[in-house]
């Protein structure tokens, strides 16, 4: 008994020491001014200091000093953070909140695995380590979902409400998953696509794991748009999941492993730019330099990789214009992807592209830069907290009379679809990826 208590207290000290080494300097940068508080969606929704960036920074600092227990007192406030990084943009002294958050998550994940394993944590780990990093398994998941939809099992499941009894978040999200493309259509995808007309540039396209399995139509349309503005598009075959979910969930080593696999695969492509269409993935890709900063043989190549990584909207603006063929009548609002805006600092280009579509009435929505609370898998792990933030977002959407909410990230797109469904507006409003609305107006199907 005494030996196990001694062992536990040794582990607690080691965790606090690791937290201290990784985060203490950053926590000391915070001058407690509170400028980040109005930018924080969880603080606005939950109204307590421990749900604010400043509160979380102070808790990390106290845990690193060994004044509070990592598992008992830090895990929940950190887990309730969306990781949207709006606080970073608002901070006048540049506290690197996102890096602190990921370091804290890594230490918390280690301390949790020593304490107890909930069913949700076990499922999350299974997905992180045994599903997302395996493109073939992800494709299989997409194929299974296609069969599920094709056989009408989705309708059966919904009418019997059986999924509600298992998991409310799964039951709700299942309703908004778009129609998955057939396995045959996905098999037909090539590895090189010539530019239409004069070739201006060669780009390598990042397909993503969830995007490619469940929303491969958006990838197909992305390739059409890119070739239409003069890009030769190659799809590196050995590419993998970007590792964003791993980094956000404290699986730091796995994130590093995935980063290295992607860098190898893309550097071999001979492309001038590496282009993605998902804000969350893109943010992970541009952070490879930080992720590999301590590895001498990777540091330089990771920095080069980051320089070449671009969101599709940047390429379409730079090499456009797009060959629009028809008017796209409707009022559209743009919901920023937090990671595209706050990490990649891309927010003008999606708006410019939307404004360039013939017939579109673009309306800037109040709070468009504020998180929709999709947060990777936050809406699965903290469904009710997420829905509270989403319902507030829908109030802002409704003030605009929008007919379409445009996003640039698969998670945001599903979350906004759920918001539209929850508010009974599916008949007059839809949620679309930027690529879909651009492609539609160009006549691509
Ligand atoms: S990352 Fe987002 S949710 Fe988390 S503390 Fe910062 S602003 Fe709040
Ligand atoms: S804005 Fe920056 S310095 Fe001010 S409280 Fe927030 S994190 Fe700390």
Image (cartoon, helix red, strand yellow):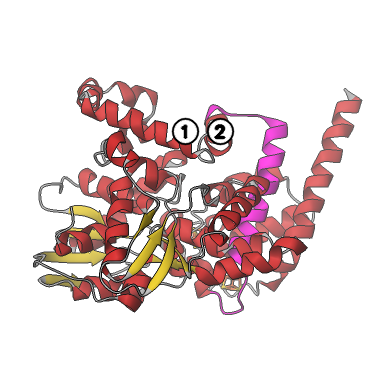
**Mark nearer the N terminus (2 vs 1):** 2
User: Residue, x 79% and y 56% (percent of image)?
Assistant: 65
Q: Quadrant of residue 379?
A: top left
Q: Which residue is mark 1?
A: 137
Does residue 52 appear in this view? Answer: no
Look at the numbered discs 2 and 1 and tell me whether their residues touch, using CB distance below 8 Å.
yes
Q: Quadrant of the N terminus?
A: top right
Left or right of 192, for residue 69: right
CB at mark 1 closer than 8 A to ligand 1?
no
Q: Which residues are magenta?
A: 91-120
Residue 76 position, x and y percent, is: 58, 45
CB at mark 2 closer than 8 A to ligand 1?
no
Residue 262 position, x and y percent, is: 56, 53
Q: Quadrant of residue 406?
A: bottom left
Under circle 1, the secondary element is helix
Q: Nearer the viewer, mark 2 or mark 1?
A: 1
Q: Main secondary structure of the magenta part?
A: helix
Residue 5 position, x and y percent, is: 85, 30
Q: CA distance from mark 2 to mark 1?
A: 9 Å
Residue 28 position, x and y percent, is: 72, 69
Residue 130 marker: 2
Q: Quadrant of residue 7?
A: top right
User: Residue, x 33% and y 67% (percent of image)?
Assistant: 367
Foreground of the two, 173 or 328 = 328
Label 1 CA crowd tier, 10 Å (few <14, some 14–19, many 20+): some
């Amino acid at each position: 008994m005494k030996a196990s208590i001694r062992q536990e207290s040794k582990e607690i000290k080691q965790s606090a020491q690791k937290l201290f080494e990784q985060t203490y300097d950053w926590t000391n940068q915070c001058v407690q001014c509170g400028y980040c508080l109005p930018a924080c969606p969880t603080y606005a929704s939950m109204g307590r200091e421990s749900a604010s960036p400043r509160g979380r920074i102070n808790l990390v600092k106290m845990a690193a000093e060994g004044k509070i227990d990592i598992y008992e007192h830090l895990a929940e406030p950190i887990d309730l953070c969306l990781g949207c990084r709006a606080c970073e943009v608002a901070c006048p002294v540049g506290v690197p909140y996102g890096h602190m958050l990921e370091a804290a998550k890594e230490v918390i994940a280690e301390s949790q695995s020593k304490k107890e394993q909930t069913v949700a944590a076990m499922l999350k780990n299974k997905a992180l380590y045994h599903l997302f990093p395996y493109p073939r398994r992800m494709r299989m998941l997409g194929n299974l979902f296609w069969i599920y939809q094709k056989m009408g099992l989705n309708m059966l499941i919904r009418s019997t409400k059986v999924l509600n009894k298992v998991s409310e978040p799964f039951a709700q999200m299942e309703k908004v998953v778009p129609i998955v493309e057939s396995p045959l259509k996905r098999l037909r995808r090539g590895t090189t696509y010539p530019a239409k007309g004069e070739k201006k540039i060669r780009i390598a396209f990042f397909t993503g794991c969830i995007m490619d399995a469940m929303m491969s139509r958006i990838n197909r349309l992305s390739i059409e748009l890119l070739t239409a503005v003069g890009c030769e598009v190659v799809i590196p075959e050995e590419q993998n999941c970007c590792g964003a979910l791993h980094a956000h969930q404290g699986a730091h080593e796995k994130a590093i492993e995935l980063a290295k696999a992607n860098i190898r695969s893309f550097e071999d492509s001979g492309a001038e730019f590496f282009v993605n269409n998902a804000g969350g993935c893109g943010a992970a890709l541009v952070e490879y330099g930080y992720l590999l900063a301590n590895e001498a043989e990777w540091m330089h190549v990771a920095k080069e990789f980051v320089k070449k990584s671009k969101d599709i909207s940047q390429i379409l603006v730079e090499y456009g214009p797009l060959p629009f063929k028809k008017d796209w009548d409707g009022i559209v609002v743009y919901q920023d992807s937090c990671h595209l805006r706050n990490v990649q600092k891309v927010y003008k280009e999606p708006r410019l592209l939307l404004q360039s579509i013939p017939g579109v009435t673009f309306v800037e929505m109040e709070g468009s830069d504020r998180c929709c609370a999709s947060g990777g898998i936050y809406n699965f792990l903290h469904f009710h907290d997420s829905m509270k933030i989403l319902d507030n977002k829908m109030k802002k959407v409704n003030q605009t009379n929008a007919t379409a909410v445009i996003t640039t990230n698969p998670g945001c797109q599903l979350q906004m679809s759920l918001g539209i469904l929850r508010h009974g507006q599916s008949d007059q409003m839809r949620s679309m990826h930027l690529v879909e609305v651009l492609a539609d107006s160009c006549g691509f199907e």
